[in-house]
């Protein structure tokens, strides 16, 4: 059958998350592939949303976001970064960070522009660059001294006269790297030298274990050239709510909003009111969640190491990258895609093959990504099943 899909989407096919989740369901596998919690979000937040519904907050929201929510976000952003944000002009509420990414690219990047992406990358970036008609330039993150990082010379070489933006995802999915102040300074200096934008995806901003998360917007000279993106989903275990946001100067926000108004126009009103409660009263929840995820990380890292994986301990996010050369040798698989399929079909555990987040052939092919945003019982069962690899 000839495809009718527009040419710009043909390279992308179905996302790996849908594919792996379907395969995991078919084989009744423990699903450590897609990054969603298998437990519910906080009751006080759900209650705030249902109360908002009962109080009649059920018509279109303000297109850039309900006033109490943008006020809450502006105050939080100023606290964290020291940058005063005007709730009315600088904050746009989107349908998850995914829409914020798409709206930022569509609203601020022109066809023919180049955009720098680190690889491995979250899969929607490449599609968003394609939607904007721009060209991606890739810079590799590779393991050095137990964490994934970039080579500053390779990064500097990626900048050209056509570079319009660089996307920085910190804490980084899938590698778990939280960029250091030195790494962010290197990126910021190149942005300033080449007069380009920084698009900062910070959806895992609260999920950090061994480092402090720093927003690149807070570095000198970056506030007016950065669009900071985030969402509620990871921080409050409410990935299905799809409440996201873009924070930027009025000039940059105008670009984001020009796309947002025609993509979704506005985001579900009662859920925005629930989000206000989360951001206002959620500090204890976040503290407990980070404690819980730290234990989950340590448990899974130890379990995977005991089975024969070489684990990179993530500094943030809820993903572990595990090197599988020894396991693959034992099981007769030659790359991450073959191994992740075998782990589902023969051992009943689903992971993600991270080479699908790369364009450089072979990059990350000797790793698997496991999500640990799961109940202790789920992780125990996954480790138990994987122990069968050892025979
Ligand atoms: C790095 C990164 N950015 C953005 C998203 C999407 O966020 P949302 O669910 O808020 O659209 C994800 C989800 O997994 C992610 O990992």
Image (cartoon, rainbow, N blue to C red):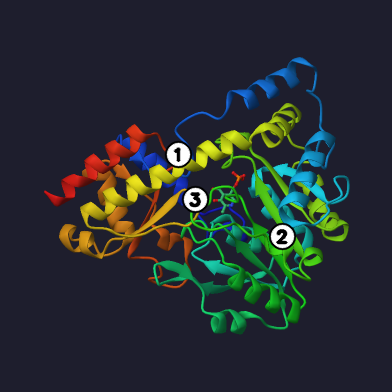
Residue at numbered disc 1: 292
The CA span between labels 1 and 2 is 35 Å
Q: Quadrant of residue 236?
A: top right
* Image x and y of residue 335, in percent: 30, 63
Q: At x 26% / y 40%, what residue is drawn?
A: 348
Mark 2, Cα crowd under 10 Å, few <14 / some 14-19 / many 20+, is many
The disc placed on residue 15 is 3
Residue at numbered disc 2: 105
Which of these two is toward me, 289 or 120? 289
Q: Give the mark nearer the N terminus: 1 vs 2.
A: 2
* Secondary structure category for the residue under label 2: helix
The CA span between labels 2 and 3 is 19 Å
Q: Give the mark nearer the N terminus: 1 vs 3.
A: 3
* Secondary structure category for the residue under label 1: helix
Mark 1 vs mark 3: give the one in front. 1
Mark 3, Cα crowd under 10 Å, few <14 / some 14-19 / many 20+, is few
Residue at disc 2, CB closer than 8 Å to ligand 1: no
């Amino acid at each position: 059958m000839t495809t009718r899909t527009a040419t710009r989407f043909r390279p992308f096919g179905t996302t790996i998350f849908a594919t792996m989740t379907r395969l995991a369901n078919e084989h009744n596998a423990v699903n450590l592939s897609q990054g969603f919690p298998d437990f519910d979000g906080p009751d006080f937040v759900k209650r705030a949303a249902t109360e908002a519904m009962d109080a009649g907050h059920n018509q279109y929201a303000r297109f850039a976001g309900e006033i109490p929510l943008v006020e809450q976000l502006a105050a939080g952003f100023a606290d964290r970064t020291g940058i005063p944000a005007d709730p009315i002009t600088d904050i746009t509420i989107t349908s998850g960070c995914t829409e914020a990414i798409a709206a930022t690219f569509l609203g601020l990047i022109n066809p023919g522009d180049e955009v720098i992406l680190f690889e491995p990358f979250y899969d929607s970036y490449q599609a968003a660059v394609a939607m904007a008609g721009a060209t991606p330039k890739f810079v590799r993150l590779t393991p050095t001294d137990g964490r994934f990082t970039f080579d500053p010379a390779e990064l500097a070489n990626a900048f050209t006269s056509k570079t319009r933006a660089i996307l920085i995802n910190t804490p980084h999915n899938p590698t778990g790297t939280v960029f250091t102040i030195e790494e962010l300074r290197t990126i910021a200096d190149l942005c300033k030298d080449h007069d380009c934008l920084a698009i900062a995806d910070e959806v895992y901003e609260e999920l950090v274990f061994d480092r402090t998360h720093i927003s690149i917007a807070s570095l000198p000279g970056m506030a007016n050239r950065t669009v900071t993106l985030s969402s509620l989903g990871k921080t409050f275990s409410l990935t299905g709510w799809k409440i996201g946001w873009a924070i930027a100067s009025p000039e940059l926000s105008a670009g984001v909003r020009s796309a947002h108004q025609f993509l979704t126009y506005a985001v579900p009103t009662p859920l925005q009111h629930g989000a206000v409660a989360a951001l206002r009263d959620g500090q204890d929840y976040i503290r407990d969640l980070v404690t819980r995820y730290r234990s989950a990380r340590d448990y899974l890292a130890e379990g995977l190491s005991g089975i024969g994986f070489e684990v990179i301990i993530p500094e943030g996010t809820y993903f572990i990258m595990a090197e599988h050369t020894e396991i693959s040798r034992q099981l007769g698989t030659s790359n991450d895609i073959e191994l992740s399929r075998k782990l589902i079909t023969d051992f009943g555990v689903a992971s993600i093959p991270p080479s699908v987040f790369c364009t450089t052939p072979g990059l990350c092919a000797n790793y698997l990504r496991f999500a640990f945003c799961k109940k202790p019982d789920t992780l125990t069962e996954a480790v138990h099943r994987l122990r069968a690899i050892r025979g």
